[in-house]
Amino acid sequence: MNSQKLEELRYPIGHFAAPGTISRAMRNDWIAELEALPTRVSDLVVPLKEEQLETPYRPEGWTVRQLVHHISDSHHNSYLRFKWALTEENPTIKPYDEKAWADLFDSRSAPIDLSLKHLEGVHAKLVYLLRGLTEAQLQRTFVHPDGNQQSTLEVNIGRYAWHGNHHLAHIENLLKRRGWLD
């Protein structure tokens, strides 16, 4: 497989790019995407058979099962990052080795229902929190130690809306390629 095709499979909606200006409407759209994510993921993966859940979305990529567990794990970490930034002054957040997490026993074998329920709960709390933030709180920051990148909470809303859509596209594109999507 050539590198361009592999890049398209890895980043089917492109890379996240924070807009220079974030409107209230844009932010509200992102929050609505976060709110809808658990249902959208469930709608795609619940009908799948066990062998379909064990299918990688691309060569040498995670299986659908691992993707479901990763989305839940990642968005759990994101929720904590929002809380840290709201309660500490420009904290340096703790990253996690997402590849190692995806290779753990639970991510490779646990029923997807565990992460689907977790994602639903985390997103309900996250969306409730985000809808209550003031403009000043949205400008609070945290630092990601990979490259010492500082991010506002407002940008992080967009980043995680993108992240959910990014992995939804992985799953949806696999289902289309395999003819598994009705």
Image (cartoon, rainbow, N blue to C red):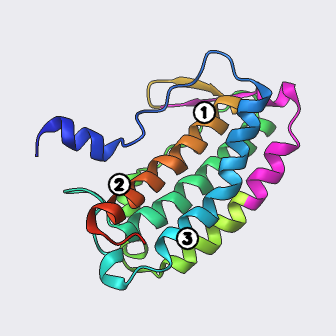
Mark 2 highlights which residue?
Answer: 99
Residue 1 appears left or right of 11: left
| Residue at (47, 72) in percent of width and height | 45
| Residue at (54, 64) in percent of width and height | 41
Judged by depth in the image, the label closer to the viewer, 1 or 2, is 2
Q: Is residue 138 magenta?
A: yes
Pinpoint residue 83: horizontal percent, then vertical percent.
Answer: 75, 45
The answer to whether the residues at label 3 and label 1 have Cβ atoms under 8 Å apart is no
In the rendered image, the quadrant that contains the C terminus is: bottom left
Q: Is residue 172 magenta?
A: no
Q: Nearer the viewer, residue 68 or 8?
A: 8
First to last magenta residue range: 124-145
> Disc 1 residue type?
Thr
First of labels 3, 1 by sequence position: 3
Judged by depth in the image, the label closer to the viewer, 3 or 1, is 3
First of labels 1, 2 by sequence position: 1
Residue 24 figure quarter:
top right
Residue 175 figure quarter:
bottom left
Mark 3 highlights which residue?
Answer: 43
Q: Nearer the viewer, residue 40 or 176?
A: 176
Mark 1 highlights which residue?
Answer: 92
Residue 170 appears left or right of 74: left
Q: Residues within 10 Å of mark 2 (few under 14, many from 20)?
A: few
Pinpoint residue 20: horizontal percent, then vertical percent.
Answer: 62, 15
Helix, strand or loop under label 3: helix
Q: Nearer the viewer, residue 44 or 73?
A: 44
First of labels 3, 2 by sequence position: 3
Q: Residue furthest front?
A: 182
Q: Nearer the viewer, residue 159 or 80?
A: 159
The answer to whether the residues at label 1 and label 2 have Cβ atoms under 8 Å apart is no
143 relative to 161, above or below: above
> Disc 3 residue type?
Asp
